[in-house]
Image: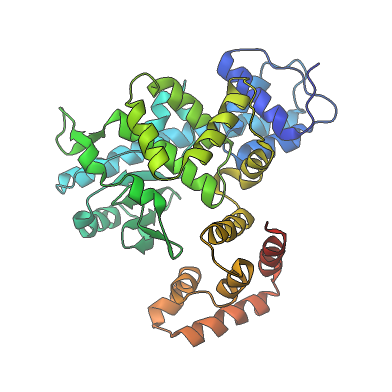
Amino acid sequence: MTHFSYDYEYLLHLLYCFIHGEKPSEKPDNISFERVFELGKIHEVANIAFLSVEMLENKPDDALYNEWKIYYYFSVERDSRQEAEREKIINALHESGIRTLEAQGSVTKKYYPQRELRMMSDIDIIVDYESFKKAEAVLEKLGYEINEQQEFEIEAENAQKLIVEFHADFFTEFMYNRAERYSKAINKPFEHAKPNESDPLTFDLDDTYFYLYSLLHTIKHFEVAGCGIRRILDLYYLKKAFESKIDNDLVSRIIDENGFRSSYETLFAVERLWFENEGSELDLTEAINDIIISGNHGAAELFTRNNIRKDRQKGVKFARINAVLHFIFQKKKYIYLSYPELEEQGRGYLYCWFYRLFKSAKRMDFSHAKNYLKTIIKSK
């Protein structure tokens, strides 16, 4: 029997077996089906793992097996709902004369064996910045409520809890008060796309730039707050689909010119280890740990640690102390994100600072602050 030391290793084994059409090994006694399922949900790959679980002689108990099966069918139903909503939104945008481009999950799905296997958190659509007002009106007419609006992004949600995001660029220039390296690497999506022959308002991204954007998007998550298993699986399927179709010299040049080579090599070493069964000369211990604990949407402790590391690389003195001060004296715009009622009331910084402190004290919830400080102390 194959030995698995951790639950995540068995989850990866289930994914590997599905990818390569192999019968999975039976679960060892030291591995918990419950924990494997929960980890799969956190990384949004439990639906794929279920297809391997079905091939096992010794399946989970009936209650867990049925819950896992329901989760799989939920992913199928969710894909169907998101696709129908995506088409409705795009048609409405086109009726308003707004051109669209897609570059995230709705495109990546096409390169999975079945599109419903690649779960999406939300529907992402790129539109021109000049069309944002009209696009927002389209969403509201379709019954969406605007959750968050930044200069180059709009997020909205409908009554069925479907979330849609409009973006004006691949990457925003600034994030959390830090200049984006990623926006300097590639941007201006419509310059790298052509109108579809059947619909001139639908733009199709050039293969090389779609692959490059997908790669940099994963690198961004990895470097900022961590990327999960699903994003590594994306790399496997995208590499398989595009490796012989793209301008690899251009990809390599942009990776090197913008300082992404280390992350690039690390992520693909992990991809080959997990999904192609290839060893690596790199020490992947920390990278794998980060990917596993980050889940699909990143982890706060990784965000904090990575920011401190970046400051140190830039030669910032007392990086840990700066991180503590940034946390205690959080900028007003970020307090507004947590408490939008303060922005609506036009409150000043001092009021916002005490309001945030009062809310934490009222909840008697200082766990976030404790975890933040622990992360800072442990940061190397």
- Residue 185, by quadrant, is top left
Q: Nearer the viewer, residue 344 or 6?
A: 6
Q: How many marks?
A: 0
Q: Residue furthest right?
A: 29
Q: In the drawing, does residue 310 fall left or right of residue 244?
A: right
Q: Is residue 312 left or right of residue 219?
A: right
Of residue 187 and residue 7, the one placed in the foreground of this image is: 187
Does 46 appear above or below 145?
above
Q: Position of residue 174 (x, y in %)?
A: 38, 60
Residue found farthest to the top: 22
Residue 59 vs residue 320, the one in the foreground? 320
Q: Horizontal and vertical percent for residue 20?
A: 58, 15
**Residue 23 found in image quarter:** top right
Q: Quadrant of the C terminus?
A: bottom right
Residue at 22% across, 60% down: 133
Q: Is residue 221 above or below residue 19?
A: below
What residue sits 39% from the left and 49% below the top? 182
Check the image and tell me how it is coloured.
rainbow
Where's residue 334, x and y in %? 47, 70
Query: Can the viewer see residue 188?
Result: yes
Please indicate whether residue 134 sits to the left or right of residue 242 in the image.
left
Where residue 203 appears, as percent x and y from the top left, is 22, 36
**Residue that appears at 44% across and 25% down:** 239
Is the N terminus in the top left, top right, bottom left or bottom right quadrant? Answer: top right
The reply to whether residue 82 is in sight is no
